[in-house]
Amino acid sequence: MSAKARRILTLNAISRKGLARLPEGYVVGNDVAEPDGILVRSHAMHDMAIPASVMAIGRAGAGTNNIPVKQMSERGIVVFNAPGANANAVKELVIAGMIMGARNLAPALCFVSRLEGDAERLHEQVEAGKKQYVGHELAGRTLGVVGLGAIGSMVADAAIRLGMHVIGFDPEITVEAAWRLPAQVKKAASVEDLVKHADFVSLHVPFLPATRDLINAERINLMRKGTVLLNFARDGIVSEPAVLDGLNQGRLHAYVCDFPSNLLRQHPRFVALPHLGASTEEAEENCAVMVAEQLADYLENGNILNS
Ligand code: MLT
């Protein structure tokens, strides 16, 4: 039994394996009053009144942009996250996204769902689809990875194993991430340098004032004709009007991302998912375990990791 039975408010469903890492006696739930800590996934906390009793917030994921981190720090509330805990899940979906873009899977699936007629008519339409949706392979193509943290470096590694060439750019790469990076990854001098030399561009940076519209019209115009752009990070890092122009002009073959867009939704080469990058049972457990342990360690012992 802990010295004081702490009270933890959960703002999203948090994996049971994670909650099991909290010390015995902790009171946990989505209607806990006067909480000592909060566990959250993607619930938007910017307009929320945070109770005065709160000492720490644990974000079961990597990005903390759903939390008013600066205001929390000013109030002395520690915010933890779970860097790397869902990186494998995101990496796998990025590879799926590259294949979706390169093999025209989204428009091909729509095409098949609209087919009708007898066996002979279906056969004719399948023959037409085979011609219409010819794609290309990943092997031998170049992937540009912007942001070489936990996710970016895993994406780079997986792409190399698929026979791709990889170039990377990260002005703030950590020593740990640099060690993790496969030696075959060539370093680009800038985002401009990277987009000029890639067939696929995948973004793995947080959403900050400095990364808003990181991919804009100027950078899209520098891309190779037919580039597949992938965004499994945050929607604000890509200018949607610039992407629409890029798709219409053929500079972009496809924009594959993990967010909806009212502007792009009708475009046949816009592929959007409902923020599924970290939505695997394994990633949800890993994130919940990491933040629950950090939160408890802070509340029990005052230790601070990943804040
Ligand atoms: C992240 O930042 O790691 C993801 O947004 C996690 C999530 O989907 O909750």
Image (cartoon, rainbow, N blue to C red):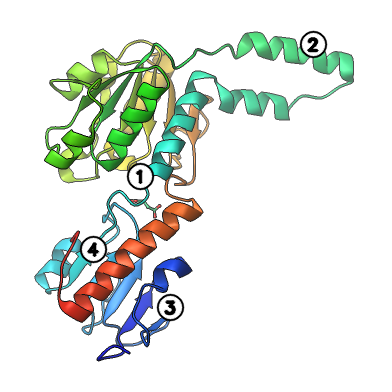
| Res 64 → quadrant | bottom left
Q: CA distance from mark 2 to mark 4?
A: 57 Å
The three-letter amino acid code for the residue at tag 3 is Asn
Q: CA distance from mark 1 to mark 4?
A: 17 Å
Determine whether 172 is above or below 117 in the image. Answer: below
Q: Secondary structure at mark 2?
A: helix
Task: Tell us which disc is closer to us: 2 or 4.
Answer: 4
Q: Residue at x 55, y 21 (%)?
A: 104
Q: Position of residue 234 (x, y in %)?
A: 32, 43
Q: CA distance from mark 3 to mark 2?
A: 55 Å
The three-letter amino acid code for the residue at tag 1 is Ala
Q: Secondary structure at mark 3?
A: loop
The three-letter amino acid code for the residue at tag 2 is Glu
Task: Tell us which disc is closer to us: 1 or 3.
Answer: 1
According to the picture, the residue beneath numbered tag 1 turns out to be 87
Q: Nearer the viewer, residue 39 or 293?
A: 293
Of the numbered discs 1 and 4, the one sitting upstream in the chain is 4
Categorize mark 3 by other alpha carbons within 10 Å: few (<14), some (14-19), many (20+): few
Q: CA distance from mark 4 to mark 3?
A: 19 Å
Q: Secondary structure at mark 1?
A: helix
According to the picture, the residue beneath numbered tag 2 turns out to be 124
Of the numbered discs 4 and 3, the one sitting upstream in the chain is 3
Task: Tell us which disc is closer to us: 1 or 4.
Answer: 1
Q: Is residue 15 left or right of residue 116?
A: left
